[in-house]
Image (spheres, rainbow, N blue to C red):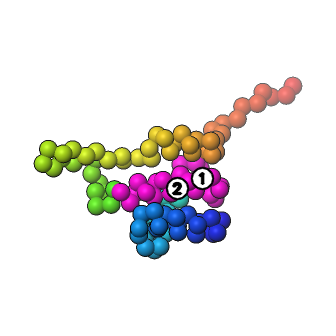
Amino acid sequence: MDEKRDEVISVLAEQLEISPLSATVLIEDAVALVLDYTGRKAMIDSMWVYARQLATIAYNQQGAEGEASRSEGGVSQSFLTDIPVSIQRGLNRFRKGKVVSYYAPAEE
């Protein structure tokens, strides 16, 4: 897993032209979101794509933390405040289901 993590960090750093340390922080935050959303404890290979996409979104939103929208000089911007639906759809196949209760009829 560390090998895949390192590969994603280097690709992200190159893609966004940022330091590997900044890319590491962004990826770690994105991995936490992905694992929290899916209910898993470890990343699966294809989940790294979604973590990198979330890290890119987080990078693009830096400096606008806490804002839902902004208007400057007649130019309006709105920001995503949650995991985008397109990424949620991709992650849905990795989600673990939760059993709330289990009912089995009593044997007689």
Q: Which residues are magenta?
A: 34-60
Residue 71: x and y, percent? 18, 47
Outermost residue toward the right in this view: 108
Q: Amino acid at mark 1?
A: Met
Say which element carries label 1.
helix
Query: Residue at image x 41%, y 67%?
Result: 17
Outermost residue toward the left in this view: 73
Of the pair 76 and 107, the residue shown nearer to us: 76
Of the pair 11 and 33, the residue shown nearer to us: 11
Query: Residue at image x 63%, y 46%?
Result: 94
Query: Residue at image x 63%, y 69%?
Result: 2
In the picture of the structure, the residue carrying the numbered disc 2 is 51
Outermost residue toward the top in this view: 108
Quarter location, residue 19: bottom left
Image: 43 above or below 2: above
Between marks 1 and 2, how big is the CA–CA gap? Answer: 7 Å
Image: 11 above or below 95: below
Is residue 40 on the magenta stretch? yes
Principal secondary structure, stretch drawn in magenta:
helix
Q: Quadrant of the N terminus?
A: bottom right
Question: In the rendered image, is residue 34 in sight?
Answer: no
Is residue 35 on the magenta stretch? yes
Q: Are marks 1 and 2 in contact (CB under 8 Å)?
A: yes
Say which element carries label 2.
helix
Q: Amino acid at mark 2?
A: Ala
In the picture of the structure, the residue carrying the numbered disc 1 is 47
Residue 37: x and y, percent? 53, 48
Residue 108: x and y, percent? 87, 25
